[in-house]
Structures are given as structure tokens and as C-alpha cells.
């Protein structure tokens, strides 16, 4: 069965936005996040779709208002509604996520249209060892076939729901078409129906401060 995914070339300012130096106190936020004492574990420790570990309330209400103000200005909208715990289980909005190189790999996916129209990632590691650990965008490219689409139709909750898509999302089914490098205090916001993933993860020891750190956000436009 042919897999019918539309293709939309990601356009800066329309499909994704990059805002550098988003927080005036980014180093303070990084230190506060890394000192958190309670974490929820994801894969490979638990059967979760997200890797590493995370904790809520990464940004204070004032910091969150600042970020959302910038996003609303970019989107030219008056209001954003964040994902809540009542939607699709426990919310990941405004969570700090830490993941090392041994705990996660690129996993192309889309974010559920029922919980968000836009997602964003704030890179918060002060000294990343590589810039190639940011956010990448992908298109479907099955072996022996022409490159396919990169947008999940809104009637489907995930790529797995699209007729003909394999249930196991092997990263080799996709090809990268755009990479946004990891830069400290950079916010990357994007339309949630685009196939995307963390480009890669870093940090191979047990020290949390050595691993990829990012704050994640999910919003509906209201």
C-alpha cells in the first residue's frame, strides 16, 4: 500500500522559528534544572515514547510568560493554550528533559494534533560538545522508493495511524531534510505536524550535567 503523506518544504518564519538568546537568565535556569532532585524516567528504563528523564516546572511563571510572549509575537496570535495533564495523560509541557547518548537516538515523529498546533524546544546546556544535537526535520524515504512526504495529516494522531505506515518507526525509514543546530539559550518552535526529532544526544557517563538538556513546550492556538 502506498503511503500518502503530503510534502511541505519547511520554511523559516512559516513552519519553524529560531530565537537565540531567548532568556536573559539562561545560565541560572540551566543550573536550577540540573539541580532538580526528582525525575521521571523514560526509555530505556520505562516503556515511554520519550527518552532519558524529565521533570516539570522547568521555567518559572515569569520566564514562561516571556517565552510565550516571544512565540505569540512570532506567530502573530493573541493567545496560546499549553498542554495540560488532562490531555493524552501526563503533560510534557514546560518539562526539562535530560538524555545521554546511550539513552536515546533520533526518533522521527510528529506531535499529536489533538494536544498541540506548535511545539518548541529550548536548548539549555551551556557548553554542548557538538552543535549536531539540536532538532532535525525529516521526510519519509522508503528503501527503493522516491522520497515521500513530511507532514502528518491532521486526521491522524500519529504516523502509526497513517494507512500503510509500519508500526515500528525505524529511523532508517526517513531522511533528514533540515537541521537546526544546538546552541545554548536557543528556542526552536515549529508546527507539530512536521516530522521531526532531536538530531542526536550527547553525554556518555552518569553525570547529568554532561548530557543533552532541553525544555519542551506544547501549545494550541486559541
Image (tube, grey):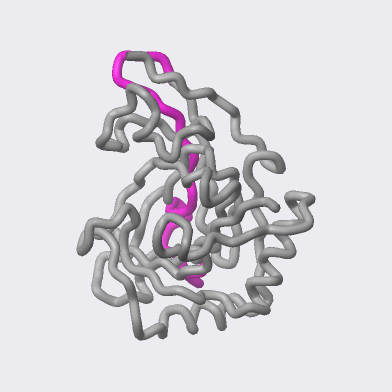
All told, the count of numbered labels is 0
Q: Residue at coordinates 48% horizontally, 53% vertically from top-left?
A: 134
Can see residue 115? yes
Q: Nearer the viewer, residue 177 or 166?
A: 166
Q: Residue at coordinates 68% horizontally, 76% vertically from top-left?
A: 24
Q: State whether residue 115 is above or below residue 211.
A: above
Q: Which residues are magenta?
A: 124-147
- In reply to whether residue 61 is colored magenta, the answer given is no
Name which quarter of the figure residue 16 lies in: top right
x and y percentages locating residue 103 in the rendered image = 26, 59
x and y percentages locating residue 133 in the rendered image = 43, 54
- Horizontally, residue 196 falls left or right of residue 78, namely left
Q: Residue at coordinates 32% horizontally, 14% vertically from top-left?
A: 1
- Horizontally, residue 128 falls left or right of residue 20, namely left
Q: Taken as a whole, is the magenta stretch helix, strand or loop?
A: loop
- In reply to whether residue 131 is colored magenta, the answer given is yes
- Horizontally, residue 144 falls left or right of residue 56, namely left
Q: Residue at coordinates 73% horizontally, 58% vertically from top-left?
A: 79
Q: State whether residue 132 is above or below residue 4.
A: below
x and y percentages locating residue 116 in the rendered image = 56, 50
x and y percentages locating residue 147 in the rendered image = 43, 20
Can see residue 151? no
Task: Give the residue at the far front of this rendering.
Answer: 86
Q: Nearer the viewer, residue 6 or 198?
A: 6
Name which quarter of the figure residue 185 lies in: bottom right
Q: State whether residue 148 is above or below residue 117.
A: above
Amino acid at each position: 500500500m502506498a503511503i500518502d503523506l503530503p510534502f511541505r518544504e519547511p520554511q523559516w518564519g512559516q513552519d519553524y522559528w529560531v530565537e537565540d538568546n531567548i532568556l536573559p537568565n539562561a545560565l541560572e535556569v540551566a543550573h536550577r534544572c540540573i539541580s532538580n532532585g526528582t525525575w521521571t524516567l523514560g526509555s530505556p528504563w520505562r516503556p515511554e515514547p520519550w527518552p532519558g528523564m524529565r521533570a516539570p516546572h522547568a521555567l518559572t511563571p515569569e520566564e514562561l510568560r516571556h517565552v510565550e510572549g516571544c512565540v505569540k509575537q512570532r506567530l502573530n496570535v493573541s493567545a496560546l493554550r499549553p498542554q495540560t495533564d488532562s490531555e493524552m495523560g501526563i503533560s510534557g509541557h514546560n518539562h526539562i528533559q535530560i538524555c545521554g547518548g546511550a539513552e536515546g537516538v533520533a526518533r522521527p515523529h510528529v506531535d499529536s494534533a489533538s494536544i498541540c498546533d506548535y511545539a518548541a524546544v529550548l536548548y539549555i546546556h551551556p557548553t554542548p560538545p557538538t552543535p549536531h544535537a539540536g532538532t532535525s526535520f525529516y521526510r519519509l524515504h522508503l528503501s527503493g522508493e522516491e522520497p515521500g512526504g513530511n507532514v502528518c495529516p491532521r486526521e491522524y494522531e500519529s504516523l502509526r495511524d497513517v494507512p500503510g505506515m509500519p508500526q515500528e518507526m525505524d529511523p532508517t525509514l526517513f531522511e533528514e531534510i533540515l537541521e537546526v543546530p544546538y546552541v545554548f539559550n536557543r528556542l526552536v518552535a515549529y508546527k507539530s505536524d512536521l516530522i521531526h526529532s532531536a538530531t542526536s544526544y550527547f553525554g556518555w557517563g552518569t553525570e547529568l550535567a554532561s548530557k543533552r538538556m532541553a525544555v519542551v513546550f506544547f501549545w494550541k492556538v486559541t
